[in-house]
Amino acid sequence: MTTPRIAFLASPTDEAQAALKQLTARHGPCEPGEADVLCALGGDGFMLQTLHRHGGLGKPVFGMKLGTVGFLMNHYRDDDLFDRIANAEPAKLRPLEMLAQTESGATQASLAYNEVSLLRQTRQAAHLGIDLNGQTRVEELVCDGVLVATPAGSTAYNFSAHGPILPLGSHTIALTPIAPYRPRRWRGAILKADTEVRFHVLDPYKRPVSATADSHEVRDVVQVTIRESRERTVTLLFDPEHNLEERILSEQFVV
């Protein structure tokens, strides 16, 4: 069996940089484009950065936790790395595509592996309309914001906003309001992953709204369209004893 070429990528923290130096000295340097596997050293934020920067390469990513949050990461160890990669279980993720139109008429596109969120920019509540596959489902949502989350991202911001945790591979997305005021009884929906979700900002000048895809923010939006990507997928690798599917399942039983 051929030894895989590994490109090591690290967050700027001292701990991650020290691990980068040690692992590169042991296994040798390799550029992401030349590698068989990417190894991300840091927390979940750095993993998302890695997916945004290098996801188009189609290389599997094995993350090791050297940050504050590591839901998408494996435990850090500097030994047996080749064996861990060979025995790792893959988790395929399909990101959301966000297309945001702003007051100025500009259009910005971005990907989100966790969630796309719309948030009020001022002290005044946002007023939003929601269309699903071209059909209006919520004429006016008065809220602090609303988000659409993937299964991998459903345990993050979505869950803190009282949204559902979605099983990996369920081919669903979560539509979750953030601090909704009207309609008071609506708490969101679980949708098929291929649903096109479109948000309309009903009063963008008096009640401005921003849209964020993972960490990419677009301010003063008037319309945001979200759909699951039909072309882009990424593969994360996990140690079998603590794979991503099991982690998401376990989160539903935390008390």
Image: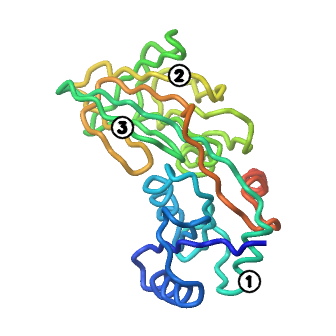
State which quarter of the image contains the N terminus. bottom right
Q: Is residue 198 above or below residue 42?
A: above
Residue 62 occupies quadrant: bottom right
Identify residue type, mark 3.
Ala
- Secondary structure of the residue carrying tag 2 is loop
Identify residue type, mark 1.
Asp
Mark 2, other Cα within 10 Å: few <14 / some 14–19 / many ≥20: some
Give me the disc on residue 113.
none
Residue 81 percent coordinates (x, y): 70, 79
Residue at 70% in and 87% down = 79
Residue 132 percent coordinates (x, y): 53, 17
Q: Label 1, label 2: how many angstroms apart (C-alpha)? A: 43 Å
Q: Label 3, label 1: how many angstroms apart (C-alpha)? A: 42 Å
Identify residue type, mark 2.
Glu
Give me the disc on residue 196.
2
Q: Which residue is mark 3?
A: 211
Q: Which residue is mark 1?
A: 80
Does the image show residue 133?
yes
Residue at 67% in and 83% down = 77
Q: Is residue 129 above or below residue 193?
A: above
250 sits left or right of 119 in the view? right
Instruction: Work out whether residue 235 or residue 122 is closer to the camera in this orientation and state it.
Output: 235
- Secondary structure of the residue carrying tag 3 is strand
